[in-house]
Amino acid sequence: MRTLVSWNVNGLRSVLGKGLLEFIDQRVPDVLCLQEIKLGAEHVPALALPYPHQLWHHALKPGYSGTAILSHEKPQRVLRDVPGLPPHPTEGRLLAAEFADFWMINVYVPNSQRELTRLAYRQKEWDPALRKFLSGLARKKPVVVCGDFNVAHEPIDLANPASNRRNAGFTDEERTGFTELLGAGFADVFRRQHPDEPGHYSWWTYRANARERNIGWRIDYFLVSESFSKQVRESFIWPEVTGSDHCPVGIRLKAKL
């Protein structure tokens, strides 16, 4: 059995000072996918992370975005970015690692922003290109895609759906894009295993003691190819793990990588 974990750390150097190494030692993820690492390549050697294989995709803008895949297994092939999206090679939003049995995709989906200034780009360019990219990979090998998708798919996925209609992360356009991704042959394994359970969230604003009151959103996911879904023994969210405004989410697989 192997454990795959995704975590938007909202600054990797920050979360290192808040117990990341202890978290790795205690939870022992076989593959750890990080989003919003917010650092440049020059900082990596000093991190001393306990993984022999480390993939990094840094944003051009200092202190912004970025993704990483840390693994005990050596990937067979590595891809960066979504084909056909020229703005995003500078934002470090997607890493893909091919392992023996599946593709591991780590994604940090663009936020539509408070005034929905990036919603049209998200709806008309990013979501269709991501769906096409993942579907293409899945035709040859199962895909596991994780990360911060910046959308709560259904009303059960956030504490206050009525008051958040048309807010970034809960617009009809973003939710439809996620539905279309699932319709392309991917399973939201946590919701499939917990179909009617409210109160499971992965992000909380820092305001108004939202985390303590569990006024949150589930915007971090693991999706897997339908053909691979039976390999998922367990899907979990770890809200007790602090250090970021997001908490880790993950799956355990029946088969080894």
Image: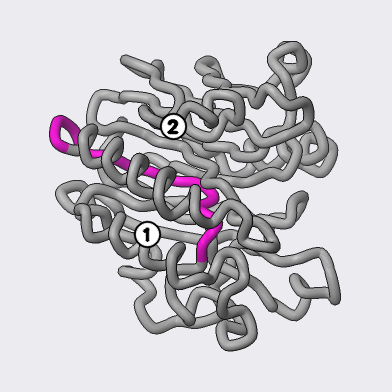
Residue 216 located left or right of residue 249: right
Q: Is residue 168 above or below residue 39?
A: below
Q: Which mark is residue 85?
A: 2
Q: Is residue 106 above or below residue 40?
A: below
Q: CA distance from mark 1 to mark 2?
A: 16 Å
Q: Which mark is residue 40?
A: none
Q: Position of residue 227 (x, y in %)?
A: 15, 49
Q: Position of residue 146 (x, y in %)?
A: 44, 46
> Which image quadrant for residue 22?
top right
On-image quarter of the N terminus: top left
Q: Which residue is mark 1?
A: 177
* 96, 23: nearer the viewer: 96
Which residues, given as a range, are shown in magenta? Answer: 139-151
Residue 25 located left or right of residue 74: right
At a point 40% along the width and 36% down the height, the residue shown is 105
Residue 169 located left or right of residue 86: right
Q: Is residue 98 above or below residue 256?
A: above
On-image quarter of the C terminus: top left
At a point 74% along the width and 51% down the height, the residue shown is 244
Q: Is residue 135 above or below residue 183?
A: above
> Which image quadrant for residue 179?
bottom left
Q: Is residue 96 visible?
A: yes
At a point 53% along the width and 24% down the height, the residue shown is 89
CB of mark 1 within 8 Å of CB of mark 2?
A: no
Q: Is residue 1 visible?
A: no
Q: Amino acid at mark 1?
A: Gly
**Picture mark count:** 2
* Disc nearest the viewer among 1 and 2: 2
Please tell me how crowded label 1 is: few (under 14), some (14-19), or many (20+) other residues with Cα within 10 Å: many
Q: Position of residue 132 (x, y in %)?
A: 27, 40
